[in-house]
Image (cartoon, helix red, strand yellow):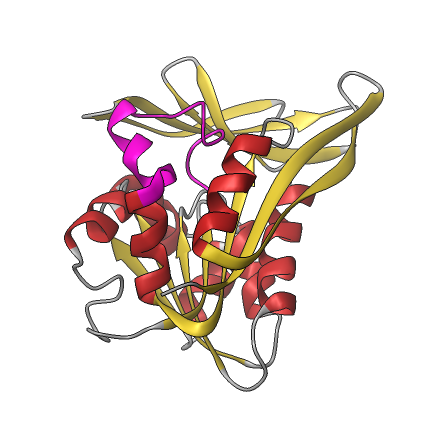
Amino acid sequence: MRFEELDWRRTPLGELTLRRRWDPAVHADVHEIKLDDEFLMSSLFTVSETRLGQLAVAEAPEGELDVAVGGLGLGYTALAVLEEPRVRSVAVVDALGEVIEWHRRGLIPAGQRLGTDPRCHLVHADFFDLMRTGAPLDPESPGRRYHAIVVDIDHSPAHLLDPSNADFYESAGLRRIGERLTPDGVFALWSNDPPDDGFTARLAGHFAHARAEIVRFPNPLQGREATSTVYLASAPRD
């Protein structure tokens, strides 16, 4: 089938659509999630989302790891985290219950793996609100401090899905991230924009180590190389 709308829902954020289409450029089915007319996620472009999860666990401390992922999407970041044998638990928090349902129903390919891995918990909640209020990221493990917190929700620290998310990227929000991490824990953030020196500097004010890494990947639709940014910060300051 060239095109199929798998589900459509009206949500407080807008009209949410899951669709599958055959893409002749890559000779494969492509799954896409749209919010109104905006693409939230496409399985055509998953290199940087996967790299986000890989970098987060690679930078995490030695030993078993407890990881929190803000943003489920098509599940590629969570899958990359689960590929690391040291990972003991992954709490994946998403504000859209419809997306969690699609995974559990198997409408999204990653759902089979995420739904059967006992280390993975899908949590329906607003990640930013949990961080703001101090509520548990995983209700089954209140008070847990994480070895890595990985976030892929907004387009970038400057281009937000909701203006109310802005405080997460400011000083108070970065301090709250540090409070949820172990002393040598890692914060990893995906961005669709080029590196922002101002945001990297803010990270450096709250973490002993902070950097922005550019991830390069092919764009078959435009026949050129594309880039995203992964911010990595570790060892939160007191």
For residue 94, above or below residue 123:
above
The spot of residue 13 in percent (x, y) is: 25, 24
Image quarter for residue 213?
top right
Q: Nearer the viewer, residue 222 or 163?
A: 163
Residue in the foreground of this view, choosing between 129 and 32? 129
Q: Quadrant of the N terminus?
A: top right
Where is residue 99 shown, x and y percent of the image?
Answer: 35, 42
43 on left or right of 144: right
Q: Position of residue 128 (x, y in %)?
A: 27, 44
Counting from the top left corner in percent of width and height, residue 153 is at 42, 38
- Give the residue drawn at x 56%, y 64%: 81
In the image, residue 29 above or below residue 144: above
Is 161 magenta? The answer is: yes
The image shows residue 76, relative to residue 11, as above or below, that is below
Is 205 magenta? The answer is no
Is any atom of residue 14 visible in this view? yes
Tell which residue pokes out farthest to the top in this image. 37
Residue 226 vertical position relative to residue 132 in the rendered view, above or below: above
Figure disc tally: 0
**Quadrant including the C terminus:** bottom left
Q: Residue 236 or 12: which is nearer the viewer?
A: 236
Q: Residue furthest bottom?
A: 63
Residue at the image point whose x is 27% and y is 58% from the top: 123
Q: Nearer the viewer, residue 42 or 161?
A: 161
| Left or right for 192, reference 26 | left
Q: Is residue 45 visible in this depiction of the protein?
A: no
Magenta span of residues: 151-171
